[in-house]
Amino acid sequence: MKLPIRASLALVAVLATGCAHFEASPLAPHWTASSQIGQQEISGLSIAARTLDGMREENEYIGRPARDRGFLPLVLLFENTGDRAFLIRREGIKLETADGKTYPAAELSEIYDGLRFSKGAALWGVPLGLFPAFFMGSRISEQNEKLLEDLNAKTFHDLRLFRNPRSYNSLAFFDLNERLFELGPGDFWLSVEVEKDATPEAPGEILLFRLTTE
């Protein structure tokens, strides 16, 4: 027996809204710069980058399939064991490809726009009345707020990493669109510009890290 049209619409709406569920784990605390094969150390600052292991780790740590949306997510790992503080700005983090193209780390608003849940699913509730449509829209907005909060906490922001052993992990996203699936592990590397703080005894310095990813 076929379900009535309204019942069918209700079922589709529930299933569509149920897909808008956000959940993500904190970045793994055991990931450290010094433990990565491709890490680079200059003046006591170690930096490394690692890719997430496919959709499984993307869903675990981002809660969304970033590669399916054209983003390459990289985990950035910093460890300061030197005697100075270092300043790392988002604008100084770039992905470079073997063909000479450069991609800056995406801004939070760009990442959120690319990964957020679409409110289109709420339209399935319109034939059922205003309240179901409103409920579905509210549910999607609630999940998007959780996504934005988590992205804001994990995505790289300008960082001053102070001296004494201290580690910091974050995510950087690079919007490669269709090129994402053309690039193999050896086709790109990460460039990170770092400002080393000055002291009364020594001037500041600009450091350039060039990293491969695991």
Image (tube, helix red, strand yellow):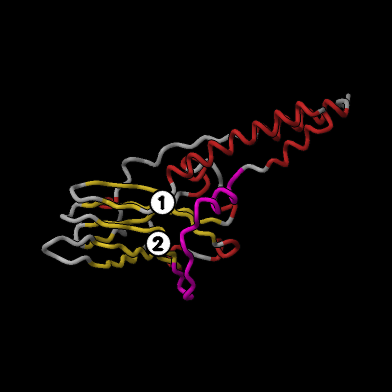
Question: What segment is highlighted magenta in the picture?
Answer: 96-116
Q: Is residue 201 above or below residue 79?
A: below
Badge 1 crowding class, 10 Å Cα cut-off, few under 14, some 14 to 19, many 20 or more, is many
Q: Is residue 92 magenta?
A: no
Task: Identify residue for label 1.
Answer: 156
The residue shown at (24%, 57%) is 45
Give how far across and how far down residue 31 sits, in percent. 33, 46
Q: Nearer the viewer, residue 60 or 198?
A: 198
The residue shown at (73%, 36%) is 122
Q: Which circle marks residue 32 in the picture? A: none
* Residue type for callout 1: Phe
Q: Is residue 132 left or right of residue 43?
A: right
The residue shown at (15%, 55%) is 83
Residue at the limit of the structure toward the front, as seen here: 200
Q: Is residue 61 above or below residue 127?
A: below
Give how far across and how far down residue 70 sits, in percent. 58, 57
Give how far across and how far down residue 186 sits, in percent. 43, 66
Q: Is residue 98 above or below residue 130?
A: below
Give how far across and how far down residue 1 sits, in percent. 88, 24
Residue at the limit of the structure toward the bottom, as seen here: 100
Q: Nearer the viewer, residue 63 or 86?
A: 86
* Pointers 1 and 2 in contact (C-beta within 8 Å): yes
Q: Is residue 17 left or right of residue 173?
A: right
Q: Is residue 192 above or below residue 57?
A: below
Q: CA distance from mark 1 to mark 2?
A: 10 Å
Q: Secondary structure at mark 2?
A: strand
Q: Secondary structure at mark 1?
A: loop
The residue shown at (49%, 72%) is 101
Badge 2 crowding class, 10 Å Cα cut-off, few under 14, some 14 to 19, many 20 or more, is many
* Residue type for callout 2: Ile
Task: Identify residue for label 2.
Answer: 93
